[in-house]
Image: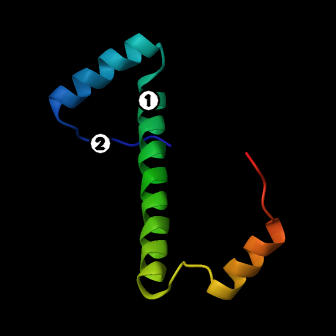
Amino acid sequence: MKTAVSIPDPLFKEAERLTKRLRIPRSQLYARALEAYLQRQRSKGIKEALDAVYRTESSELDPVLAHLQSEALGREDW
């Protein structure tokens, strides 16, 4: 899909230098950059959701379960 966007001149010039260095079309550079930005935003949403859960829930293992797990593994000499 074609679209028109306005960006500051210094950013455009830097992007132009990068397309020449990478030898890729401008549209590919902008598509890659947008994809990376969107992925970071999705990941940020996941982190925020997990943070919200762990603000109210403990992530510690139940002490009885921790003890039983420890007993089941046994001891090894290193």
The image quadrant of residue 2 is top left
Above or below, comparing residue 17 to residue 44 in the picture: above
The residue positioned 40% from the left and 11% from the top of the image is 21
Amino acid type for the residue under numbered disc 2: Val
Element class at badge 2: loop
On residue 46, the disc is: none
The image quadrant of residue 67 is bottom right
Dividing the image into 4 quarters, which one contains the C terminus? top right
Is there a contact, CB below 8 Å, between mark 1 and mark 2?
Answer: no
Report x, y in % for residue 64: 68, 87
Q: Is residue 23 left or right of residue 63?
A: left
Q: Nearer the viewer, residue 71 or 36?
A: 71
Report x, y in % for residue 9: 16, 29
Above or below, comparing residue 15 to residue 34 in the picture: above
Q: Which residue is mark 2?
A: 5
Q: Is residue 65 left or right of residue 73?
A: left
Q: Which residue is mark 1?
A: 29
The residue positioned 78% from the left and 54% from the top of the image is 76
Amino acid type for the residue under numbered disc 1: Leu
Q: Residue furthest left?
A: 9
Report x, y in % for residue 62: 63, 85
The residue positioned 81% from the left and 66% from the top of the image is 73
Q: Residues within 10 Å of mark 1 (few under 14, many from 20)?
A: some
Report x, y in % for residue 52: 42, 80
Q: Is residue 65 left or right of residue 50?
A: right
The disc, 1 or 2, on the residue closer to the chain's N-terminal end is 2
Q: Nearer the viewer, residue 55 or 77?
A: 77
